[in-house]
Image (cartoon, rainbow, N blue to C red):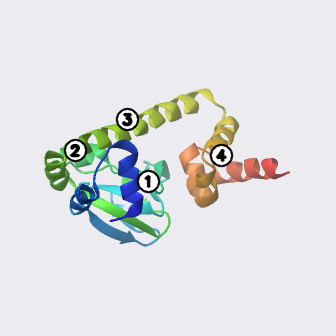
């Protein structure tokens, strides 16, 4: 059993070692090299990914051909295109490994079977998704309320692990900055 996943589940629900072993059987372990796409635009999202090690990003390519990162997932975070996953329609996004990553993947049918067998996991997923939804609400608020510089400083204060791990051009894409402006902000902060 993955101790990372085990600890994460137990933050939200009480489960025995035996239950966790049975729950884990519904997941497929996947290793993804850096820059490998787990999902591509136009394909149906088949899995919800739990990051054991590494970092994933969710992005799209706009009509000018520019990649726009909208979400990152590091250890203990989940990632999927939930519209595509739920409705089984083609995705408008890519999911890519930013670093060499180890993930647990669970498909829609397996998740439904697991939830029927272990109803307490419904609470787990509800709690995880509520936290993610709240984070998305705050991100939207900060993007509409903060200047680009304030947004960068807020993000770097609250999520230093991302600032240290994410390549500058991807972080700039996520924050809605140019890589050059992000470099300027970082230089100002150092001096």
State the image coordinates of residue 172 (x, y, percent, origin top left).
Answer: 60, 50
State the image coordinates of residue 49 (x, y, percent, origin top left).
Answer: 34, 56
State the image coordinates of residue 118 (x, y, percent, origin top left).
Answer: 19, 48
Q: Closer to the N terminus: mark 1 or mark 4?
A: 1
Q: Which type of secondary structure does the marked residue at label 1 adopt?
A: loop
Q: Nearer the viewer, mark 3 or mark 2?
A: 3
Q: Closer to the N terminus: mark 1 or mark 2?
A: 1
Image quadrant holding the N terminus, namely bottom left
The Cα atoms of the two marked residues, 3 and 2, are separated by 17 Å
The Cα atoms of the two marked residues, 2 and 4, are separated by 33 Å
Decide: few, some or many residues near mark 3? Use Cα within 10 Å; few <14, some 14-19, many ≥20. Answer: few
Instruction: Kindly identify which residue carries mark 1.
Output: 76
The residue sitting at 64% across, 58% down in the picture is 164
Vertical position of residue 84 compared to residue 33: above or below: above
- In the rendered structure, the answer to whether residue 160 lies left or right of residue 31 reads right
Q: Nearer the viewer, residue 24 or 57?
A: 24
Q: Which type of secondary structure does the marked residue at label 3 adopt?
A: helix
Q: Closer to the N terminus: mark 3 or mark 4?
A: 3
Q: Is residue 95 visible?
A: no
State the image coordinates of residue 180 (x, y, percent, origin top left).
Answer: 69, 53
Q: Is residue 158 visible?
A: yes
**Residue farthest toward the right in the current orientation of the protein:** 191
Question: Which label is found at residue 86?
Answer: 2
The Cα atoms of the two marked residues, 3 and 4, are separated by 23 Å
The residue sitting at 58% across, 44% down in the picture is 175
Question: Which label is found at residue 156?
Answer: 4
Q: Which type of secondary structure does the marked residue at label 4 adopt?
A: helix
The residue sitting at 63% across, 57% down in the picture is 168
Labels 3 and 1 touching (C-beta < 8 A): no
Q: Closer to the N terminus: mark 3 or mark 2?
A: 2
Instruction: Kindly identify which residue carries mark 3.
Output: 130
């Amino acid at each position: 059993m993955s101790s990372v996943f085990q600890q994460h589940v137990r933050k939200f629900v009480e489960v025995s070692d035996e239950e966790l072993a049975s729950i884990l059987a519904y997941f497929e372990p996947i290793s993804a090299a850096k820059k490998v796409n787990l999902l591509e635009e136009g394909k149906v999202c088949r899995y919800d990914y739990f990051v054991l090690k590494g970092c994933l990003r969710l992005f799209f390519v706009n009509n000018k051909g520019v990649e726009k990162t909208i979400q990152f997932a590091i250890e203990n975070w989940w990632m999927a295109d939930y519209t595509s996953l739920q409705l089984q329609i083609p995705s408008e996004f890519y999911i890519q490994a930013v670093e060499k990553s180890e993930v647990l993947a669970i498909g829609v049918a397996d998740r439904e079977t697991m939830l029927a067998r272990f109803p307490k996991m419904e609470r787990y997923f509800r709690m995880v998704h509520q936290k993610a939804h709240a984070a998305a609400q705050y991100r939207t608020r900060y993007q509409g309320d903060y200047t680009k510089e304030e947004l960068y400083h807020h993000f770097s204060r609250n999520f230093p692990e991302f600032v240290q791990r994410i390549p500058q051009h991807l972080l700039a894409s996520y924050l809605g900055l140019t890589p050059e402006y992000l470099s300027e902000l970082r230089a100002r902060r150092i001096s």
